[in-house]
């Protein structure tokens, strides 16, 4: 999240930087329409998907947080993106999608620690798909699961190493209540 809003700091005028940060927040929060539409398209017709994706953009949690500089704006969009990629990865068992799922799972966790809930969800969904697919695909399913876990771990560990080395002495950074 700090990376996304840091682009607004190109100026020394703090008022302009704050306005740009709010614009970036609005763009990030309205970007929820795209993964929502693509995810809904897997289950509904195009017109219905577009309608429900538009309604998702006006969901109170998305709509209310848009003008505020908060990580929820990025979190909700990342949650839908990671869900979309996880569904495709589990359905197709393509390794590059599991790699992307690992990156997104790491990003969701780094945005909000609530993202940890997606790890067991991903494991359970992959296990259920593996059970349905039969014995011949167990090795492929486990390999893809390990790839996603390792990539998510590398993604999170790199941030932790940075925080310990440069930013603070706390692995996940400094939180203020």
Image (tube, grey):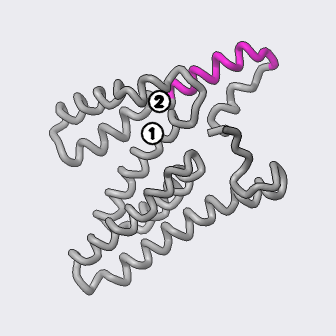
Quadrant including the C terminus: top right
- Residue 104 lies left or right of residue 13; in this view the side is left
Disc 2 secondary structure class: helix
- Residue 2 lies left or right of residue 144; in this view the side is right
Q: Residue at x 42, y 65 (%)?
A: 120
Q: Are marks 1 and 2 in contact (CB under 8 Å)?
A: yes
Q: Residue at x 45, y 57 (%)?
A: 117
Q: Extreme bottom residue here?
A: 135
Looking at the picture, tell me which residue is in the foreground, 83 or 118: 118
Looking at the picture, tell me which residue is in the foreground, 38 or 77: 77
Q: Position of residue 152 (x, y in %)?
A: 55, 62
Q: Residue at x 34, y 68 (%)?
A: 124
- The numbered mark at residue 175 is none
N-terminal-most mark, 1 or 2: 2
Q: Which residue is mark 1?
A: 77
Q: How many marks?
A: 2
Disc 1 secondary structure class: helix
Q: Is residue 19 magenta?
A: yes
Cα separation between marks 1 and 2: 7 Å
Counting other residues with Cα less than 10 Å from the Cα at mark 1, is it few (<14), some (14-19), or many (20 or more)?
A: many
Q: Is residue 71 magenta?
A: no
Q: Position of residue 113 (x, y in %)?
A: 55, 51
Q: Position of residue 75 (x, y in %)?
A: 50, 41
Q: Extreme front residue here?
A: 177
What residue range appears in magenta? 12-27
Q: Which residue is mark 2?
A: 29
- Residue 31 lies left or right of residue 22; in this view the side is left
């Amino acid at each position: 999240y700090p990376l996304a809003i840091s682009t607004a700091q190109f100026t020394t005028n703090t008022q302009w930087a704050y306005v740009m940060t709010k614009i970036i927040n609005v763009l990030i929060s309205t970007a929820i329409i795209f993964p929502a539409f693509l995810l809904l398209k897997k289950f509904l017709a195009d017109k219905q998907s577009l309608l429900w994706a538009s309604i998702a953009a006006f969901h109170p949690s998305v709509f209310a947080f848009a003008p505020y500089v908060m990580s929820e704006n990025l979190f909700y969009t990342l949650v839908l993106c990671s869900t979309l990629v996880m569904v495709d990865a589990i359905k197709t068992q393509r390794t590059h999608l599991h790699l992307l799922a690992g990156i997104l799972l790491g990003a969701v966790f780094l945005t909000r620690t609530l993202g940890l809930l997606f790890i067991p969800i991903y494991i359970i969904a992959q296990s259920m798909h593996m059970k349905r697919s039969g014995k011949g695909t167990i090795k492929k399913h486990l390999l893809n699961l390990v790839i996603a876990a390792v990539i998510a771990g590398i993604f999170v560990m790199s941030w932790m190493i940075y925080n310990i080395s440069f930013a603070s002495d706390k692995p996940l950074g400094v939180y203020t209540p």
